[in-house]
Image (tube, grey):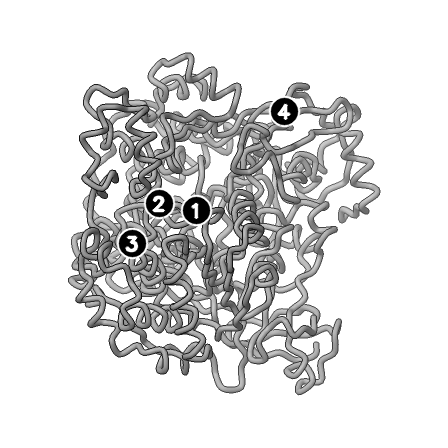
Amino acid sequence: METTMTRRDFLKSAGAAGAAGLVWSQTIPGTLGALEKQEIKGSAKFVPSICEMCTSSCTIEARVEGDKGVFIRGNPKDKSRGGKVCARGGSGFNQLYDPQRLVKPIMRVGERGEGKWKEVSWDEAYTFIAKKLDEIKQKHGAHTVAFTARSGWNKTWFHHLAQAYGSPNIFGHESTCPLAYNMAGRDVFGGSMNRDFAKAKYIINMGHNVFEGIVISYVRQYMEAIENGAKVVTLEPRLSVMAQKASEWHAIKPGHDLPFVLGFMHTLIFENLYDKKFVQKYCTGFEELKASIEPCTPEKMALECDIPADTIKRLAREFAKAAPKAIFDFGHRVTFTPQELELRRAMMMVNALVGNIERDGGMYFGKNASFYNQFLGEEDPKAKGLKKPKTPAYPKVEVPRIDRIGEKDGEFFLANKGEGIVSLVPKATLNELPGVPYKLHGWFIVRNNPVMTQTNADTVIKALKSMDLVVCVDIQVSDTAWFADVVLPDTTYLERDEEFTAGGGKNPSFGIGRQKVVEPLGDAKPGWKIAKELSEKMGLGEYFPWKDIEDYRLQQVDGDLDLLAKLKKDGSASFGVPLMLQEKKSVAEFVKKFPGAASKVNEEGLIDFPKKIQLFSPKLEEVSGKGGLGYEPFKYKEEDELYFVQGKTPVRSNSHTGNVPWLNNLMEYDAIWIHPKTASKLGIKNGDAIELYNKFSSQKSKALITEGVREDTLFGYFGFGHVSKDLKRAYGKGVNSNALMPSFTSPNSGMDLHVFGVKVKKA
């Protein structure tokens, strides 16, 4: 029987969950709807934790509210987020109760994708998985199993299990989202960079839509800057919420962000608007950079990006005048082009050229313990890092990864092994990856949904169907889990404890990870426990020498009970004072706190950078001949097609929140934005049923006629158009954007291509 639930039904059932449990009929065994009763038990006091409704990982507090369910709010001790949560964060408790939520292990009993399952015990599931993994290892080698995990804490456990098993092929989700700017940061600056939006006077934004993608700390900083009179200039193909709040919106041609940045940079350099003193002292490769972009005049680049040359030059001059309180936001999405790495490097280099690095209102290095400690004197106390429990060495692997990360001449050398180029997994499975001497036979997928998040869904599904083993760990039978052999029920983020984390903004900090607010429903287990128990079934228990997560945490803090208690009570802790290396006042406060640091201060009262900023990359030049910057035209679409671009909505994540009724009530359909002139030519009216199609797929939606998008462009939100028949019935309305995308891997960055051509007609 198909589950049907109105908003009133859900509100009523959610409110009664604590007392009476839930009763639903459900088609899939092992789901909450198939159980007769589940009661919620948990803390009546607020427990500090971390949200998991998207990858922003905002700090929260949560508690059980009598018989009314779970109440979630922002952690009031977190000043950067102001104790706030977004719509996704506030609705997170819905995942506890959703009738389609998986709470028992299930195994496939029909063909992959047929949707026939049986409930099994954990031991039966572990035994089956361990046996199949051993068979693959004996027949093909452990390296032929890929392990992918959504970025975050589950990576720790399952990447560790993968390497203990003997597979080097470990991946996150980064190459489908933020990998290129991670790589660019490492190449240009040697590490991650943060942005001091709140104090900026001028911000260039190219599609980093923090008001819909929602990073609460960024939203608050942007609004503070705007309220203090900062000018924000947005360049993207549609009028997003970010563009609505900007001083200027320029509808740039999709996929042509790099020409704009190169023309902008050309103006800074050839009109001598850059900070010569800063560049000479702190940068290398300036002359090589200058020579590489000399052909990229604003006049030439204007023809590519569809932004007038005079506008490019005006914006560059205004930006330089406002520096160093000026930020060229290197973005999160932009539009994912074939030159994604060049684009991100160029955006970051613009900031270096105007000398905004380590300045208020500019950019600054992320100061974890190791970075911070290098500026302290010998006699000053050092910031602590977190220790990693000792485990045996991993088995030696003689074969390369499918993406060749770690190889001397590997194209993707700027990615770390935990990120990897995950979009290559389907290609390596289908023997479509030149230079790789083996194919993949197994895929272990943890809280990751490649059918919805990787380009060309048909290719991903074809790869899944050809595997010897597919295992998914998730809270629901996702679009990817629909094609698995075994699906293991993970806990929601409100039901589990996780390890501590260490990082840093302007000074080092520590985070709690997540803390359990309620006891797990059904037989769901947290990732750390699944990985540990499966390792024991595989004969690899020595790689998990901790009793439980509390024991692991204690080893992380090296037995420091005070730090342990503080993190559990407050959710975070920090060390020292904020440090901006190029601000005299900040340096003086730092020396006051740590007198031994005076030896690091130069004659100007500042602290020099530990390494030079790289405006030309010798390694990239060696590997691909692209040490400098340049523009290479690319054909995204045919003449009779329209550009199709996608973005995030503030009430849904890309694929993670498809089982949250409250969010679906806020947006149940991703209507496709079409310009009035384009719609008129095609005979399409507002609200019409339409079909988007190209050689890869055909998808149906509704038309939203608006002047807030270019005439040659269609726009749609991510997270719709589910493939899983179970999710499709309830929440599958709209376009699966990835089904329409080509299977493309950008050179050097490994990023997907998210700009492509489609046709549209009335359905």
Task: From the image, state whether disc 2 or disc 4 is nearer to you.
Answer: 2
Residue 79 position (above or below residue 188):
above
- Name the residue nearer the viewer: 722 or 213: 213
Between the C-alphas of marks 3 and 4, the distance is 40 Å
**Can residue 654 be seen at all in this image of the molecule?**
no
From the image, state whether disc 4 or disc 1 is nearer to you.
1
Give the residue pinned by disc 1. 196
**Element under disc 3:** loop
Spatial CA span between label 2 and label 1: 8 Å
Dot 2 or dot 1, earlier in sequence: 1
Label 2, label 3: how far apart the Cα atoms are: 34 Å
Secondary structure under tag 2 reads strand
Q: Mark 3 points at which residue?
A: 402
| Circle 1: residue type | Asp
Task: Choose mark 2 or mark 3, whichever is in front.
Answer: 2
Q: Distance between the residues labelled 4 and 1?
A: 37 Å
Residue that numbered label 4 is attached to: 518
Q: Which residue is drawn at 81% across and 47% down?
A: 6
Left/right of residue 395 with respect to residue 136 in the rendered view = left
Tag 4 and tag 1, C-beta contact below 8 Å: no
Instruction: Indicate which label's residue lies in the foreground, 1 or 3.
Output: 1
Instruction: Say which residue appears at 56% left-offset and 36% top-offset.
Output: 51
| Amino acid bearing label 3 | Ile
Residue depicted at x 80% and y 38%: 11
